Image (spheres, rainbow, N blue to C red):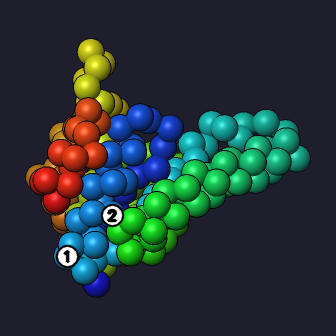
Amino acid sequence: MRKFLVVLDDSRECLNAMRFAAMRAAKTGGGVEILSVIPPDEFNHWIGVGEVMRAEARERIEAHFNVFAKWMRDRQGVDPELVIREGETVEEILAQVCDDPEIGVLVLGAASGKGGPGPIVNALTKSAGALPIPITIVPGELSKEQLEQIT
């Protein structure tokens, strides 16, 4: 089964990427894999404190995932899977793409502000020609109705 890989982070545009991935998966018989990356610098503390912070980060990710997963199951009939990795975001996205041969499309949300589309989109589009899969970039300002029309 072809899976759409989407990145779960704290960005506003992440929501549209999730919606797009779920809608496309529902219409094409695919799946959705949600990747969240915990940056390594969050745990540069004493060992005990670092472990507590790691556990809290995982709980926060799972809570966000559960919200998206419920929407995907209820509205799109898609049951997503969650993958949590630790490291640098772009490196871990690339590693996940290489590690899971069922991933067929990487879906990213793009910010619309003056700062550009965002650091992940900037980094991955520079090396897009070398990726083994296509990237779909979803504008963060699209409405639900616009997303439904294009999926």
The residue carrying pointer 1 sits among few (fewer than 14), some (14 to 19) or many (20 or more) residues within 10 Å by Cα, namely: few
| 65 and 73: which is toward the camera | 73
Expressed as whole percent of the image width and height from the top left, the position of residue 16 reads: 32, 45
Q: Residue at x 63, y 58 (%)?
A: 62
User: What element does badge 1 sit on?
Assistant: helix
Above or below residue 128? Residue 10 is above
Quadrant of the image for the N terminus?
bottom left
Q: Amino acid at mark 1?
A: Thr
Expressed as whole percent of the image width and height from the top left, the position of residue 117 reads: 26, 30
Q: Amino acid at mark 2?
A: Ala
- Which residue bears the numbered disc 1? 28
User: What element does badge 2 sit on?
Assistant: helix
Q: Is residue 135 visible?
A: no
| 145 and 92: which is toward the camera | 145
Q: Residue at x 39, y 73 (%)?
A: 78
Q: Residue at x 27, y 46 (%)?
A: 144
The answer to whether marks 2 and 1 mark residues whose Cβ atoms lie closer than 8 Å is no
- Which residue bears the numbered disc 2? 22
Quadrant of the image for the C terminus?
bottom left
In the image, farthest residue toward the top: 114
Above or below residue 20? Residue 112 is above
CA separation, marks 2 and 1? 10 Å
